[in-house]
Image (cartoon, rainbow, N blue to C red):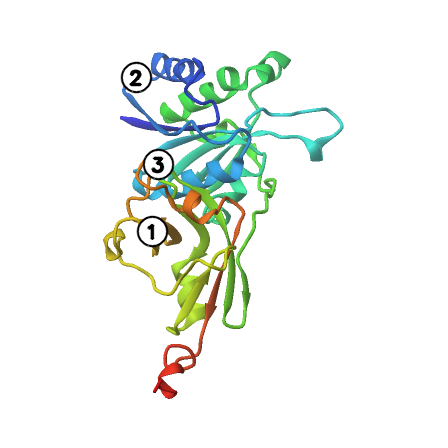
């Protein structure tokens, strides 16, 4: 059974997702369609890539991922460098199909792609007006039937690059940014556990937010390391720093986003302190 995942900015208010699923189910025998998310902020390819990056390792070889965010191709004769082509990328023995709008460059280890194919099987303007029905669905059907993507177009190694904010590293300091807020109000920061360990080298640290009244000085192993309603920092299953409130959801005191006044693109600072310079300095001068 072929697995097809959908990541789109279509939302669930309208009929669009149902129509897409109907097209796939009516054309592919024995397939399973899995929703990654349809609540991607419109045209936000960074958010879409974040969702896909976090689940690809959970899916088996041969899975087909449709990247349906800002997926309208743009093809004009005489302006090749501005064209946005529909592509198929084979990465980690899985297939990703979408528009060359920069999203492919945001996939983890995209440089290791086994192949990148520009779809050429379209010519009429009507196909570009309705690309999901006329371009992407037929390509997904062909892949599901075992068609080699290399027969569906031509090699296209020079994909469009999109750039996102990366952590800034200075001596004993990492500056990161909030890249995602989940439904619980937990905040995901673009600082990985690996980077944290490399820069910190096991030294004490303080995590500062934009409001200097709030800071965290340890990494928790789980949410229950702190009392309910207390803030914490943890590295999540995908290795990113997460700022959270234990059971801090709406109606139960609020999540980290609302209580700490943090939002996507806000800066998070981690300052490392040489061992013995912070936690023990006051002990050298005991109060009488």
**SS class, disc 1:** loop
Please name the residue that numbered disc 3 is placed on: 250
Question: x, y percentage for residue 265?
Answer: 54, 47
Mark 2 Cα-neighbour bin, 10 Å: few <14, some 14–19, many ≥20: few
Which tag, 3 or 2, sits closer to the chain's start? 2
Query: What mark, if any, has residue 236 been given in the picture?
Result: 1
Q: Which residue is mark 2?
A: 29
In percent of width and height, residue 47 lies at 48, 38
Q: Is residue 37 shown above or below 58? A: above
Helix, strand or loop at label 2? It is loop
What residue is rendered at 46% in x and 49% in y?
Answer: 109
Quadrant in which the N terminus is drawn: top left
Tell me, yes or no, if residue 26 can be seen here. yes
Q: Tag 3, which secondary structure?
A: loop
Residue situated in front as seen by the camera: 244 or 199: 244
Question: How far apart are the alpha carbons under marks 1 and 3?
Answer: 21 Å
């Amino acid at each position: 059974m072929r697995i097809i995942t959908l990541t789109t900015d279509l939302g669930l208010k309208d009929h669009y997702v149902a129509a897409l699923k109907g097209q796939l189910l009516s054309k592919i025998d024995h397939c399973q369609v899995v929703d990654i998310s349809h609540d991607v902020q419109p045209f936000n390819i960074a958010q879409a890539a974040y969702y896909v990056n976090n689940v690809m390792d959970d899916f088996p070889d041969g899975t087909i991922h449709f990247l349906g965010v800002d997926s309208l191709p743009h093809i004009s004769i005489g302006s090749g460098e501005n064209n946005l082509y529909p592509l198929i990328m084979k990465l980690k023995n899985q297939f990703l199909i979408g528009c060359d709008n920069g999203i492919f460059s945001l996939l983890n280890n995209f440089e290791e792609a086994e192949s990148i194919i520009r779809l050429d099987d379209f010519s009429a303007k009507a196909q570009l007006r309705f690309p999901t029905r006329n371009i992407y669905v037929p390509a997904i059907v062909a892949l599901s039937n075992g068609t080699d993507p290399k027969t569906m177009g031509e090699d296209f190694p020079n994909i469009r690059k999109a750039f996102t904010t990366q952590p800034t590293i200075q001596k004993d300091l990492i500056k990161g940014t909030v890249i995602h807020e989940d439904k619980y109000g937990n905040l995901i920061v673009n600082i990985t556990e690996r980077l944290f360990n490399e820069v910190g080298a096991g030294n004490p640290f303080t995590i500062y937010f934009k409001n200097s009244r709030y800071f965290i000085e340890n990494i928790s192993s789980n949410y229950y390391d702190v009392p309910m309603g207390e803030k914490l920092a943890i590295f999540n299953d995908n290795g990113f720093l997460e700022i959270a409130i234990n059971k801090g959801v709406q109606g139960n005191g609020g999540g980290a986003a609302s209580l700490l006044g943090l939002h996507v693109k806000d800066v998070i600072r981690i300052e490392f302190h040489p061992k013995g310079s912070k936690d023990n300095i006051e002990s050298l001068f005991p109060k009488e």
